[in-house]
Amino acid sequence: MLPRRLNPNVLVSGTPGTGKSTTCELLQRRLKDATYYNISDFAREHNCYSGYDEGRKSHIVDEDLLLDELEPLLRKGGAIVDWHVNDVFPERLIDLVVVLRCDNSTLYDRLQMRKYHDAKIQENLDAEIMGVVMQDALDSYAQEIVVELRSDTADEMDENVDRIVAWTENWLKQHKDGVTNELDGQNEDASSEEDQDYEDDTQSEDSSQSDK
């Protein structure tokens, strides 16, 4: 019998500055059985680097080394993963992908507060305008587990946390025996309805907000 994980893994993604870390920290406070993995910190602590990018003034993460270190932890379940790259983590280990989006003026202010240099700020603004992270998420995971949430204000972040917590509670009710760490028809069918309901709820709310 395949080993099973009893808690879902949630990937919180988005362009740098969209509020991933704040959202994940709030989630960890609400989900007592969850473990928060900030991949920037995790890669540094486990030396998952392949070099240094002088242009961006940042280390280059070796995705193979990263996955070697992180996959055993994801197999246990209950992970909140904070990272702006989507295609590193196998779909069989991720139950919900949340892509945070942000207004460019707000994003610009946040990146300036981080002391990002101008070229790096512009690169991230362009990525947000073009929806690069969202498209990567849709290319990497089944559409029904990917949701897009606005993250411009503290109130929106709180609302997002409420919605992810509600999704987690629903997942636990529908998967009392847990799930395997492999993609199989039973797991996909069992999760598709709940994920579609969640997606419909988020899309309808986002639509109503855009009409204001």
Image (cartoon, grey):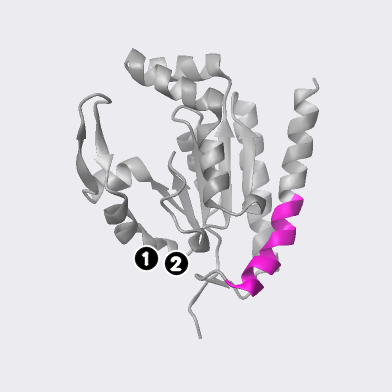
Q: How many marks?
A: 2
Magenta stretch encompasses residue 39: no
Q: In this view, does 88 lie to the left or right of 172?
A: left
Q: Give the residue at x 54% y 26%.
A: 130
Q: In this view, does 137 lie to the left or right of 65?
A: right
Estimate how packed mark 2 is, as few (under 14), some (14 to 19) or many (20 or more) residues with alpha carbons within 10 Å: some
Which residue is at the front of the view, 74 or 161? 74
Magenta stretch encompasses residue 187: yes
Please, what is the three-letter code of the amino acid marked with disc 1? Pro
- Percent position of residue 89, x then y: 44, 54
Q: Do the residues labelled 1 and 2 touch (CB within 8 Å)?
A: yes
The reply to whether residue 114 is in sight is no
Estimate how packed mark 1 is, as few (under 14), some (14 to 19) or many (20 or more) residues with alpha carbons within 10 Å: few
> Which element type, helix, strand or loop, lies under badge 1?
helix
Residue placed under numbered mark 2 in the picture: 76
Residue placed under numbered mark 1 in the picture: 72
Question: Relative to 176, is 202 above or below?
Answer: above
Spatial distance from mark 1 to mark 2, Cα to Cα? 7 Å
Q: Give the residue at x 32% y 16%.
A: 117
> Which element type, helix, strand or loop, lies under badge 2?
loop
Q: Give the residue at x 43% y 61%.
A: 74
Question: Relative to 121, is 12 above or below?
Answer: below
For the record, the magenta segment spans 184-197
Q: Main secondary structure of the magenta part?
A: helix
For the C terminus, the quadrant is top right
Question: Relative to 70, is 181 above or below?
Answer: below
Please, what is the three-letter code of the amino acid marked with disc 2? Lys
In terms of image quadrants, where is residue 171? bottom right
- Percent position of residue 119, x then y: 34, 16
